[in-house]
Amino acid sequence: MSGPYPKIVYTEEAMREGMQIESADIPVKDKVALLDALSQTGLRNIVVGSFVSPKWTPQMAHIEEIVTQFKPKQGVKYTAVALNQRGVERTKQFVPPLTLTRGAGKPRLTLHQCDVFARRNTNRSHMEEMAAWPRIIATAVKNGDKEAGIGTNASFGSNFLGDFSAAVTLKFLEKQHELWDAAGIKVTTVSVGDPMAWCHPEKVEEIFGTVKKRWPEIKEFRCHLHNARGMALTTAYAAIKTLDEDDTLHLQGTLGGVGGCPYCGTGRATGMAPTEDFMHMLEGMGIETGVDMDKLIDCVWMLEKMLGRTAWGHVSRSGPRPMKPEQLFDANAPFVEDLEQCKHFKLGPEMYKDALSPYTEPITSPYLDRIKQGLPAFEVNGDWPWEADFFPAPGKELKTVERP
């Protein structure tokens, strides 16, 4: 582990971000089964769906049935999106098992940097969003709030207006900060959003890095990223590396990387960072997730069966890196060519039993022999293979290791 890293709060969004762009005909029982399976993976924060109008989001028409039928697991925080007071009232009927988030936490100023997207998505202009700021601040003062947040959406760029530099985003954050300063309320949280997948690691480094230098009292960071251009996971990694162990970073993704927005112009291609790939990356960084990768991959395969197509993730297709000797691939496995055969990492050699094999003699290796003996393949501070007869060195006569 090369940290220290910030505390990471990860939220799984497949039941909301993922489903909202998929067919409305997916049976409720299938969605319930997937939600129940997700609950058993070790994920701690799961969004179950949205309490929104089925006229524009028909995939959420049966959200009450899903919430009524699924089996909540103790220790998992279940939330739902509610965009207005009507949605909040619908959500309240299911608290618990749901946790109501709208209106909870610190007051926050925010806006879409893309006026066009705001009009398409929420039927509100960029200007109307800003016009709400004085009311939000007045309410916070009246309530005696001591801390508040700042943030923007479409923080990196727009399919309709083009690129937004980090300097533009920081200017919006600066203006919001000034308003809270004038009200005597301390700013301790910042958020950036990316509905149209313009995120990039360089930009999040500049934005979060500048925020930390300019306003060191900000310790809570939120970063909602989409993946149409393949940058969500690398941008999340950059965010993690930019922050410190005293910071908290909120991130989201979806099972299989599915999801999208009908208003942004890229539909299902918008996607998010695949949860299974995200967890795999964190584990590789030495960050414990508490997630059972085997169960998570089962969920991806369940989702793919529901959708009738392969999802966007990678770990569910190739398997996690085999870190233990018993997980290593068979050196004498035959050709593995298609995605079904590739499932041998989880389902065993039965998956490629009829595949073509070019090997007339068994594949052997002294490195593999070492592993079978419980030794490492390489000894960085030892003799192997640096002092072996076959390893080149100045003035050394090499001895060829004959194959058996």
Image (spheres, rainbow, N blue to C red):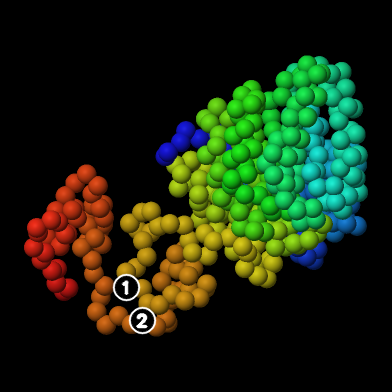
| 352 or 150: nearer the viewer | 150
In this rendered view, identify the residue nearer to me: 191 or 10. Answer: 191
Q: Which mark is residue 266?
A: none
Against 157, residue 366 (above or below) is below
Is residue 104 at all visible to an observer of this figure?
A: no
Q: Give left or right: position of 183 versus 270.
A: right
Q: How many labels does the image show?
A: 2
Do the residues under discs 1 and 2 have CB atoms within 8 angstroms?
Answer: yes
Q: Label 1: few (<14), some or many (≥20) within 10 Å?
A: few
Q: Earlier in the sequence, mark 1 or mark 2?
A: 1
* Label 2 environment density (alpha carbons within 10 Å; few <14, some 14–19, many ≥20): few
Label 1, label 2: how far apart the Cα atoms are: 9 Å
**Numbered tag placed on residue 332 in the rendering:** 1
Q: In this rendering, would 127 be left or right of 24? A: right
**Element on which disc 2 rests:** loop
Above or below 111: residue 401: below
Amino acid beneath label 2: Ser
Quarter of the image with the C terminus in it: bottom left
Q: Residue at x 47, y 33 (%)?
A: 4
Examine the image and state in which quarter residue 334 appears. Answer: bottom left
The foreground one among 171 and 340 is: 171
Q: Give the percent coordinates (x, y) of residue 222.
A: 67, 38
Q: Mark 2 points at which residue?
A: 357
Question: x, y (%) of residue 361?
Answer: 24, 79
Q: Is mark 1 on a helix, strand or loop?
A: loop
* Residue sitting at x 90%, y 34%: 131
Amino acid type, callout 1: Asn
Snapshot quadrant of residue 237: top right
Is residue 147 shown to the viewer in this render? yes
Residue drawn at x 33%, y 56% is 325
